[in-house]
Amino acid sequence: MLKKLLSLTYALILCLSVILVGHSEVVNYKTIDWTVLMPEQWLRAIKKDFDSLYKLSNLQDGSPQANKAMLELQKKFDEAPIVKEQINKKVRISGYVVSLDASRDKYREFLLVPYFGACIHLPPPPANQIILIKSGAQTKFTKLPESMDMVWIEGELKESRVSTAQGISGYALTAVTVLPYEKK
């Protein structure tokens, strides 16, 4: 009888350990900065473009030359390349929420941008500085974010060029966790 009880106890412990080990997988999200999402070569080229635009600073807003310069810059922003090495990485990144609609439920999509006011004022940031955030039933929230709230987002970064009324994203991320921003 004791031998059978010990055998059953051992089997139970073995089963529980398999179950617990299977559920104890810890995902480590690497905290990244927005600069790692911009290819260095593109960044150098866009800085040169800004130097050229500075020479045009005496143009009148709304003039044909100013409008042409802004359209050229916006085209480069919309076509901004991504950093392929960041794709499929489990990341943690902070940024500001830009709502895409009036939905306030946890199944909504929104944009994450690096600075306050981005996508509300023109021009929107480059595509490689806009992340389309998808949330769903598995997303953990401590509070549903409002537009322009600063948050931490954790999830796997994907390539996704999506055009919205607020800007074009170069990346997407299905959020695992959305937390109010707190300095680490």
Image (cartoon, helix red, strand yellow):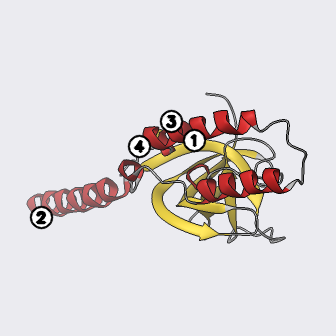
Amino acid at the residue labelled 4: Asn
Which mark's residue is nearer the viewer, 2 or 4? 4
**First-in-chain label (2 vs 1):** 2
Asked if labels 3 and 1 touch by Cβ distance under 8 angstroms, the answer is yes
SS class, disc 3: helix
- Quarter of the image for residue 150 reads top right
Amino acid at the residue labelled 2: Lys
* Residue 16 in the image, given as x and y percentages of width and height: 29, 59
* Residue 126 in the image, given as x and y percentages of width and height: 62, 51
Residue 46 as seen in the image, left or right of residue 159? right
Viewer-proximal residue, 111 or 64?
64
Which mark's residue is nearer the viewer, 4 or 3? 3
Residue found 60% across the figure and 61% down from its top: 169
Which mark's residue is nearer the viewer, 1 or 4? 1
Question: Could you say which disc has been placed on residue 46 in the image?
Answer: 1
Cα distance between the residues tagged 1 and 4? 33 Å
**First-in-chain label (1 vs 4):** 4
The residue singled out by tag 4 in the image is: 28
Residue 124 as seen in the image, left or right of residue 76? right
**First-in-chain label (2 vs 3):** 2
Which mark's residue is nearer the viewer, 2 or 1? 1
Residue found 71% across the figure and 39% down from its top: 53
Asked if labels 3 and 4 touch by Cβ distance under 8 angstroms, the answer is no
Q: Residue furthest left?
A: 3
Residue found 75% across the figure and 56% down from its top: 68
Crowd band around label 1 with a 10 angstrom C-alpha radius: few (<14), some (14–19), many (20+): some
Q: Is residue 132 visible?
A: no
Amino acid at the residue labelled 1: Ile
**First-in-chain label (4 vs 3):** 4
The residue singled out by tag 3 in the image is: 44
